[in-house]
Image: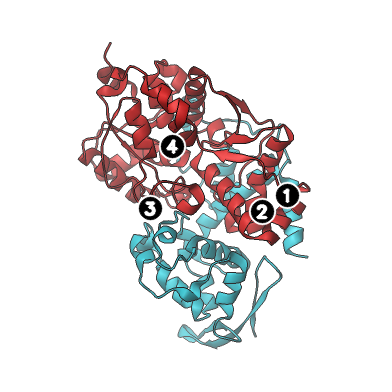
Chain colours: A cyan, B red
């Protein structure tokens, strides 16, 4: 069975074929020309990973590379080879903090953050990396708050994240100290309730006609 | 001079000190900031991981609101918001399809006439800078600080218009103008771990320890920042970091607006100096001549 990756832009669908992998499972590799995945990333991000010549400046400057399963240069290389599962299932795309150190140092001017953004959007549909599911949950909590309240309601967002990540009570002392210092609002902003919700639904409709 | 003001979510809550100190500095310099009514979130750390279109539409919505009210310039102090605004404008300029998409989502024409301005640009240039240069420099003279720019204010520099993304100096020059002794150091553009603060606190602890350690190493009395998330990670998490490492005695983390406000003679409470985890007031009392 082929794997379908439906990116959230321009209705492009990428087909993957299974090849034998480790532990009795199989990998999915993008079908068609070797450049299919990099073409799709270029179409959705404006960044061309095929010009990368593996100088590894991105990996050496990346502040979180030490915690990633694949460093940025390895991830780009895997994407050029069409290794869908490896790329979309990596922890690297979620540990990337969009700090853009790689972007500013790349001699080929590859906008790796934009590539990461497209990969993240794709991975939300198909990928799963267990190690970083709490990171994904924290982004979902932020979006939930913006959609509902029009703004990030910090207390509600952190609470929603702690519930989904099952980490209730984390940072309790910091939260109480913030409150004591007048830096934690108890109530959300009601004046902007639902004001951004239309943007979410219209953007979704445009991207998924 | 008057400008539209977009505080962003953090400055209404966890980064209140940045909001009050910016307002204090501006009012003392005769700059009027008028908060945009019903502004909404710029999309923060999450929107761009989900949708390029949503990530562009969320900040631009606020520029549409500004344009409707006749504003030509919006002041955006949060480095995260500033970056989201700038990236949205750049994306729409580069990609006509994205621009059209944003117009459809917002059901409004693209607000081409509105500019986005960071307070460092506002306070660091021309007339304001000259005014700061005429201040008595004594209030900051005894203070040795390092400027921490972090990521989003300067990278990529094609978007932010930063002077040098490896070694920016805008904040250094501004604080020197106001009288502070600004030291050179190696961590000015390092990453604080940003949005991983909730989900991967271990990474934040590691990165911020290096920043704090370097700041102490060069002999800084305080670290000066321009980003709410940098401040949160360096100040609010500092106690955890020092406990974990078993060393350190608390290094004050200040917004650059707080130092400027202090130079202008504003009292501590007006600058939110009483709201930090590491209390900067003893340092300022010690170094400010009476």
Q: CA distance from mark 4 to mark 3?
A: 21 Å
Q: CA distance from mark 1 to mark 4?
A: 29 Å
| Pointer 2 and pointer 4 on the same chain | yes
Q: Which residue is mark 1?
A: A199
Where residue A4 sits: x, y (%)? 65, 77
Q: CA distance from mark 1 to mark 2?
A: 7 Å
Q: Nearer the viewer, residue B141 or A120?
A: B141
Q: Chain of mark 3?
A: B
Relative vertical location of residue A168 with respect to residue A79 in this rendering, above or below: above
Q: Which residue is mark 3?
A: B203
**Residue depth check, mark 4 versus mark 3: number of the one nearer the observer:** 4
In terms of image quadrants, where is residue B241? top left
The answer to the question of whether label 2 and label 3 lie on touching residues, with beta carbons closer than 8 A, is no
**Residue depth check, mark 1 versus mark 4: number of the one nearer the observer:** 4
In terms of image quadrants, where is residue A40? bottom right
The answer to the question of whether label 4 and label 3 lie on touching residues, with beta carbons closer than 8 A, is no
Q: Residue at x 70, y 61 (%)?
A: B97
Where residue B207 sits: x, y (%)? 34, 50
Relative vertical location of residue B105 with respect to residue B130 in this rendering, above or below: below
User: Is residue A80 left or right of A186 when viewed as pictured?
Assistant: left
Where residue B272 sits: x, y (%)? 45, 23
* Label disc, if present, on residue B226 of the rendered structure: 4
**Residue A152 in view of the camera:** no
Q: CA distance from mark 1 to mark 3?
A: 33 Å
| Pointer 1 and pointer 2 on the same chain | no
- Mark 2 or mark 3, which has the lower sequence index? 2
Q: Secondary structure at mark 4?
A: loop
Q: Which residue is mark 2?
A: B54
In terms of image quadrants, where is residue B125? top left
The answer to the question of whether label 1 and label 2 lie on touching residues, with beta carbons closer than 8 A, is yes
């Amino acid at each position: 069975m082929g794997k379908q990756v439906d990116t959230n832009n321009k209705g492009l669908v990428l087909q993957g074929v299974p090849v034998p992998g480790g532990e009795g499972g199989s990998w999915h590799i993008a079908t068609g020309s070797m450049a299919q995945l990099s073409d799709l990333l270029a179409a959705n991000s404006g960044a061309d990973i095929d010009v990368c010549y593996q100088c590894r400046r991105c990996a050496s400057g990346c502040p979180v590379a030490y915690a990633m399963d694949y460093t940025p240069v390895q991830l780009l290389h895997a994407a050029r080879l069409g290794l869908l599962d490896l790329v979309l299932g990596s922890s690297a795309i979620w540990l990337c903090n969009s700090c853009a150190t790689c972007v500013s140092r790349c001699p080929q001017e590859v906008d790796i953050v934009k590539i990461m953004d497209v990969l993240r959007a794709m991975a939300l549909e198909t990928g799963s990396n267990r190690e970083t599911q709490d990171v994904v949950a924290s982004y979902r909590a932020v979006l939930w708050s913006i959609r509902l309240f029009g703004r990030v309601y910090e207390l509600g967002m952190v609470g929603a994240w702690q519930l989904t990540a099952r980490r209730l009570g984390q940072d309790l002392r910091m939260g109480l100290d913030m409150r004591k210092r007048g830096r934690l609002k108890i109530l959300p902003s009601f004046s902007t309730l639902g004001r951004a919700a239309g943007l979410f639904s219209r953007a979704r409709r445009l991207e998924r006609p | 001079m008057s400008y539209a003001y977009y505080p962003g979510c953090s400055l209404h809550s966890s980064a209140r000190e940045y909001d009050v100190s910016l307002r204090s500095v501006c009012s003392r310099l005769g700059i009027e900031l008028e908060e945009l009514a019903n502004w909404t979130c710029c999309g923060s750390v999450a929107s761009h991981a989900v949708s390029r279109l949503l990530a562009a539409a969320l900040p631009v919505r606020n520029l549409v609101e500004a344009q409707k009210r006749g504003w030509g310039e919006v002041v955006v102090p949060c480095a995260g918001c500033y970056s989201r605004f700038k990236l949205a404008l750049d994306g729409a300029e580069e990609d006509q399809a994205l621009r059209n998409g944003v117009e459809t989502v917002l059901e409004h024409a693209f607000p081409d006439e509105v500019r986005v301005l960071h307070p460092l640009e506002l306070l660091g240039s021309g007339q304001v800078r000259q005014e700061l240069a005429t201040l008595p420099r004594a209030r900051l003279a005894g203070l040795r600080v390092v400027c921490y720019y972090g990521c989003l204010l300067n990278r990529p520099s094609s978007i932010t218009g930063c002077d040098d993304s490896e070694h920016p100096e805008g904040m250094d020059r501004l604080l020197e103008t106001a009288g502070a002794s600004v030291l050179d150091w190696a961590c000015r553009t390092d990453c604080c771990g940003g949005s991983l603060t909730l989900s991967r606190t271990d990474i934040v602890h590691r990165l911020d320890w290096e920043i704090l350690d370097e700041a102490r190493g060069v002999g800084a009395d305080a670290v000066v920042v321009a980003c709410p998330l940098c401040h949160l990670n360096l100040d609010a998490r500092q106690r955890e970091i020092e406990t974990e490492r078993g060393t350190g005695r608390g290094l004050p983390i200040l917004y650059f607006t707080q130092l400027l406000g202090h130079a202008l003679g504003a009292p501590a409470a007006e600058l939110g100096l009483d709201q930090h985890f590491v209390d900067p007031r003893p340092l300022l009392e010690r170094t400010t001549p009476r």
